[in-house]
Amino acid sequence: MSQARKRHAKSRTVPAGGRPKGTAAIGAGGPRTAAPGGTVRSGAAAGPSADSSADSTADSTAGSSAGTGASAGGRTGTAERTRGPGGRGAGSGPPGRTARRRALRREAPVVLGLLLDDHDFTAMTGYRTFPHDDYAQYLHQVDRMLRDLHGKGTHVAVTLFDPADYADYCATTRQPPDAPVTRTRYVAESTTAGPAIRYDRQPIDTVRVDLAREAERRATWERATDLLLEAGPCPDCDQDLAHCAFDRASHTLLRLIEALGPGGHHVVCSLRLDPGEPALHAAAQIDAAPPHDDGDPRSPDDGDLKFSDADMLVVCTVMTAAEVTGRTAGLVIRTTTGTGEDAPGTETVRGWSLRGGTPQPLSEAEVFNAYCTDPATGDPVPPEPGVRYRAGLPLPPPLPGDLA
């Protein structure tokens, strides 16, 4: 089975006590798409075999016979034109048409499907039309093409090219799998709905790590969402139980962050499922701004929380899944700037057990054991230097007008 996909996160700032919302789709309009190492086509996708030479991709803007060059405004060739009366070329269009077309090409985004690891790469080498035989060289060629497109001002989104999902796509659509045009269509029609990251000249290894993290986040969200579909109605109102539980989870988390005070809070929620099924893990970074010295709550950024919508959506969904399924989840928050007895800059770890949607504080010893025990083997793990392990804080009472 293929890895599930995720959308790119977008940071936002909300007042303390606010609720996280869903994520927005990446980009708009008709993207140009390509698979790794492939020549970019306008309005289509090139499979992984479209171009085996990084130099030809970086140094030439010529595309395939059906598309434009890799650069949005690049030409595929030049030709002598006979000048007519008035100095205009014979057969040329109205003045400004070429400039407008080039401007339009510059605004056309590119989507590139990336083979994430050597295992996926090896699976694609079984196709006769796949021209690459070395994963390191393949990544080098992809890196050259990405840098070339970025240097020309082209917006590039990198998506996941999953060989198993590609095989399913070919079987479903009855297209020949060993054909560059099929790989092109797969990127254009399938991967763009999955996890994607924006390329901004980061190293290719960073691109791979970020894309893998995005794919894992999407997989966690989709599995947790599947659990919510079986929730049924809420016993206290006419709405779905999943909807009410999500509201409670988001407010519970934000109340805990308010209790922890200003600083950077790294939140991790874990939910164990049935035996043999991998546990769900979701993480989010929440930065809480300190209050201003003037004490005026209307001051800009006074106590505001900054976080990624997509990350918070997944964390709260996993917390919701724990409540509606009756399972026990774990919640751990690492704070990089402490309050009270913790000096600024100290890393402090606290933990809670989520039962029925209510966080039960763990003792200091329970937090220490949770962090200093290998979950796979049960063997002790040395504590991290400079990290304090503290008991979880009680959940503060809700504010007026807030959810209980």
Image (cartoon, rainbow, N blue to C red):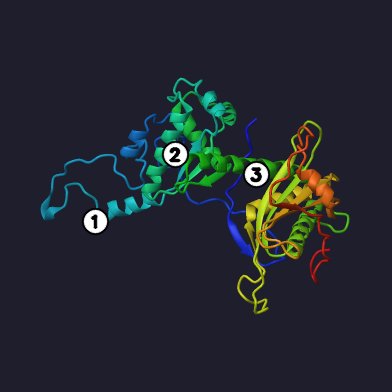
Residue bearing mark 1: 95
Q: Earlier in the sequence, mark 1 or mark 3?
A: 1
Q: Quadrant of residue 235?
A: bottom right
10 Å crowding of disc 1: few (<14), some (14-19), many (20+)? few
Q: Residue drawn at (48%, 50%), measured in percent from left and top?
A: 29
On screen, 11 above or below 152? below
Q: Amino acid at mark 3?
A: Arg
Which circle, 2 or 3, is nearer the viewer? 3
Q: Secondary structure at mark 2?
A: loop
Gap in angstroms between the C-alphas marked 2 and 3: 27 Å
Mark 1 vs 3: CB contact within 8 A:
no
Closer to us: 227 or 311: 311
Residue bearing mark 3: 217
- Which numbered tag is attached to residue 44? 2
Which circle, 1 or 3, is nearer the viewer? 3
Which circle, 1 or 2, is nearer the viewer? 2
Q: Position of residue 152 (x, y in %)?
A: 36, 48
Q: Position of residue 304 (x, y in %)?
A: 65, 67
Q: Amino acid at mark 1?
A: Pro
